[in-house]
Image (cartoon, grey):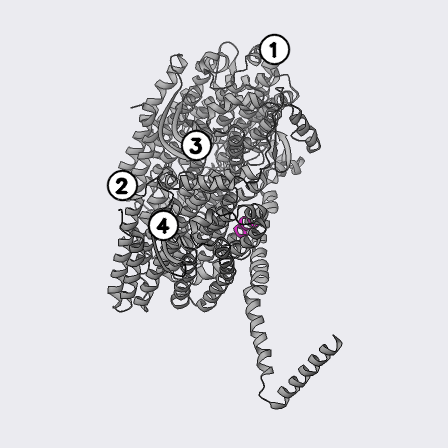
Amino acid sequence: MSSILIIVFGPLLAAIVAGLGNRMIGNVPAKVVTTGALFLSCALSWPIFLSYIAGTAEPTVTPVLQWVHSGSLTFDWALRVDTLTAIMLVVVTSVSALVHLYSWGYMDEDPDQPRFFAYLSLFTFAMLMLVTADNLVQMFFGWEGVGLASYLLIGFWFKKPSACAAAIKAFVVNRVGDLGFMLGIFGTYLVFQTTSIPEILAAAPGMAGSTIGFLGHRFDTMTILCLLLFIGAMGKSAQLGLHTWLPDAMEGPTPVSALIHAATMVTAGVFMVCRLSPMFQTSDTAMMVVTYVGAATCFFAATIGTTQWDIKRVIAYSTCSQLGYMFFAAGVGAYGAAMFHLFTHAFFKALLFLGAGSVIHAMHHEQDMRYYGALRKKIPLTFWVMMAGTLAITGVGVMGVFGFAGFYSKDAIIEAAFASGTEHGQLAFALGVFAALLTSFYSWRLMFLTFWGKPRWADSEHIQHAVHGHHESPDEETSHDDAHAHHAHGDGTAGYHPHESPWVMLVPLVVLAVGAVFAGYAFTHAFISDEGFWKGAIFYNEHLMHAMHQVPLWVKLAPAAVMLTGLLIAWFAYIKDTSIPAKFVAQFGALHAFLYNKWYFDELYDFLFVRPAFWLGRVFWQKGDVGLIDRFGPNGAAWAVAQGSRYAQKVQSGYLYSYALVMLLGLVAAVSWVMVR
Amino acid sequence: MAGFPILSVMLLVPLVAGLLCLFVEAKAARTLALVATLVDFVLGVLLWANFDIGGAQWQFVEKVPLFAGFQWALGIDGIALMLIMLSVFLMPICILASASIQKRVGEYMAAFLLMETLMIGVFAAQDLYLFYIFFEAGLIPMYLIIGIWGGDNRIYASYKFFLYTLLGSVLMLIAMLWMVHEAGTTDIPTLMAYDFPVAAQTWLFLAFFASFAVKMPMWPVHTWLPDAHVQAPTAGSVILAGVLLKMGGYGFIRFSLPMFPEASAQFVWLIWGLSMAAVVITSLIALVQHDMKKLIAYSSVAHMAIVTVGLFAFNTQGLEGAMVVMLSHGLVSAALFLCVGVIYDRLHTREIDRYGGLSINMPKYALFFMLFTMASVGLPGTSGFVGEFLSLAGIYKASSVVAAVSATGIILGAAYMLYLYRRVAFGDQKNADAAAMPDLSLREWLMLGPIAAAVLWMGVYPESFLAPMRADIAALDARLSRAAPAGDAHLKMGEPKPAAGHADHAGHTEEAAAEGEAH
């Protein structure tokens, strides 16, 4: 029995046990089963990954079950393992296992824990099905499966209207992308007569230069197929235009944000492009679009990230931006760099989210950074791991010596964009460097607002509630403490004492911190410059890899320079002179409002799609079905029959003279007809 | 099974039980109906088990000449087998779902059992007139079910239902008379291979279309369906959505396509156009409904449009996909109406806003409802996906425009179903009476559990359902191949060169095409 079966189906079984068992089996068994299954999967995944690093493994496909056979359209359930899958396996199972463990602490007070853990495991199963897919349809299964899990987890606290709205939004916006994905699969099947990924990739170069009709126009075959599939990737990976669901998805519990909306699910689009890289490679146009979309997203999301106050939203926009990096890396042909950034990003972004969760936990569910401050000494371990995450995302390091994870992966992407030599590559380089400045700024802004400065907790409703509720609880001594709480603490703490999180939350943080520190240093060679590691799992552009090493020194130093600039600006604005942000807002109010309101995308979509949909629905219903079809159809017919019979009734009056008159008139008519003829 | 007239027995069991129901008291009638439908289900399982996949096209054939060329001719192929299975599977569940019926229980059960006989008869009939009788007689029990045991506005709904469906049928009868005169036989398998003159096919097709389009129902002759569903009792809705709507699709696949292939191709844009309109329009209408049953009824119209695009894709994937959508929708919409029924029985309202937060006090119900919601929106792993995916893959071959427009159903479908789910099961509890409703009873478990299992089975391993139909679909596909539309893909190979994008230049269209042809 192959270990991959246990890796993939273990979490499914655990999800079923925990989900259906629910209250029958209780909290602890549900948690033990799901977390145990994930740690088992994780333990089995690392050896697979390491065997690829060592270069001793060969790609395998494990058939599971027949799925659909319809004429020439056939696809089966099967688990494919190659280098690309192996990377995703360790990313998914490691982060998932740690998030499961973390949730023991974070969700400790929740009354609905078995359901939560069942969803987490279900998600992991779907994600694993996605990354082990051997054909496009199974990938689509995983794709929609993670969408379902994401929907359920965003809406986990379903009593909150905002959580329900965010859940529906996530699912529906993703479906827009999935529509593209689905059409892409149909087109691919039509062209290649198969949905098997290896077969498609083998045949793709032969299709270069061919054309195909689509929606009444003719397009380059590979371009249109790649672009349709890429629409799917844009939806899942929250790229510009289809990104609106991701920030709202922060309504879900924080461990969910870490697992699904940072480390794994949202990277599925990048994974797909890399998996299909030989296909994308056949169309310059598609590659150009991928580059532009990625570069635009990386810039756009970073600008929004600089203005948000909600700690999770800052990290969410940061995720969106980092995904943009991965896409433009893929767009310029540096798939290895894209996957490498996906790999390191999973560790440091999960770390940042879980760290933020630890802060939120300490601050009694307050998420607004305006009410944080001075937490460095209060929750030191959280501070230090967040620091590691920040150093990793901003890409701190010294060339040739040592760097944090992002130093290797992000710099590789920026260098590759420059080295690609194309126009869109240059633009991506410029936007990427600028976004790196913004990344540094918003990341340090987050750190400074949270951990430095003076406590600003007193104005927070959550903290007030905590202090208030705390003192009102019956086991407290006297009620005069209440007044004490409000007046005696002029230091901004409101008498609140943040506590460090329990060890089940800290252990995952420390493990992820290790990843954020060393993942780049340890694996940079394998991902970036070792074709033997990939074994053909991605399109390996040797020429580009070579060119990357030849870029001018200023290109290599640019990320470090902007990183320091960003740090400096943040330091000035949030430590040196804290009045600067307010002055900036006063000076550039319109720009700030534009960024703070997320470029008004939600308002635009509401105006363009949501309202018209409901309006049209009402029109089609009231005016169409009721006002037109029913009125002139069945009701009209019934009315006509009723009217007709009323006239017929009048004719049958029973008066002899009227019958005689009709008879006479008829006779006259008949006679005149005969005569005229 | 040789020699045992299993189909006639399957018709007879519910008929006899139905007659008996008229003469016994309520409790006995319920038991009798349940037993009879279960017996028929067991017979159905035997039928499936003994169906020889890859054997003769028509199996379990029974032929008894009656009078004037009219004969008692029964027999099934894989397509009919699957639809009969759907009918006999749903019937016991309907009987279970009728616990809240208190008036005229005996007559009610009799109507349902008669309905079952007629449904099986429709799918098993091999004689044109016999088919017509079953097809039309099916109206009567449903008319009674809505008109007697329905809601407040039941009379209007039942008349609307009756008139709409009858109107189409009259035209179909005239066409049938002409066909029998022309071909000299009432034997359906013979007629399926008979080549009618192309000119005659046109109006024959339209006559049949009038009947099947109403049954389906296709936009814009769908307006009877929301009213009928809203007024019908739960079990009536289940049978209406689960099986009666499938008769339209069955009609297309059994009559219109094989008997009039040229005319089918000729009217393909009519069908596609109406189907596209249905997907978009009825989905949008579903989005703004306040009445649960109306919402699901409108979603049915949208789903049935996927059936028609699949059928009129003229290829294997489209036809098989359409069949799977029919089976899947039969299960899923039935289950959704049962889900509505479960809470209607508790609160006696279909008004969506009266509910909310049911996940709190009815978690098991919420789980089932979620599963069927996801099956309805076509999540992979459920039956809904397999059918939708195959249908759309099929139509994509024929026309990418129709595929793209029809596929918007997956976005709109997600929107209206999740919006419904949110208002019913999510949110906080708003009304004390809704918050006090108990979770599923054992009886309700027995109704929803088997459907849930079937939905997942069909989603994960659809081969069980595709295999019996494969040969029949292949035969139909072969017959249709002479009329099949060419499709709009026209893949043209170019010379191997770096793919320069003509993508964003529509003006280059002819150039690119000319280039392709040159090589």
Image quadrant assignment for residue A625: bottom right
**Mark 3 element type:** strand
Task: Give residue B341's mark.
Answer: none
Labels 3, 1: front one: 3
Discs 4, 2: same chain: no
- The amino acid pointed to by label 1 is Leu
Q: Residue furthest bottom?
A: A656
Give percent across and percent down for residue B270: 58, 49
**Mark 4 element type:** strand
Whichever of labels 2 and 3 marks the residue nearer the N terminus, that label is: 2
Q: Give the range drawn in magenta.
A: B277-284
| Mark 4 surroundings: few (<14), some (14-19) or many (≥20) residues within 10 A | many
- The amino acid pointed to by label 3 is Thr
* Residue at the image position 64 percent from the left and 85 percent from the top: A663
> Answer yes or no: do the residues labelled 1 and 2 have beta carbons within 8 Å?
no
Task: Give residue A74's mark.
Answer: 3
> Answer yes or no: do the residues labelled 4 and 2 have beta carbons within 8 Å?
no
Subunit of mark 4? B
Confirm whether the magenta stretch covers residue B484: no
Whichever of labels 1 and 2 marks the residue nearer the N terminus, that label is: 2
Give percent across and percent down for residue A588: 66, 35
Query: Mark 4 sits on what residue?
Result: B75
| Mark 1 surroundings: few (<14), some (14-19) or many (≥20) residues within 10 A | few
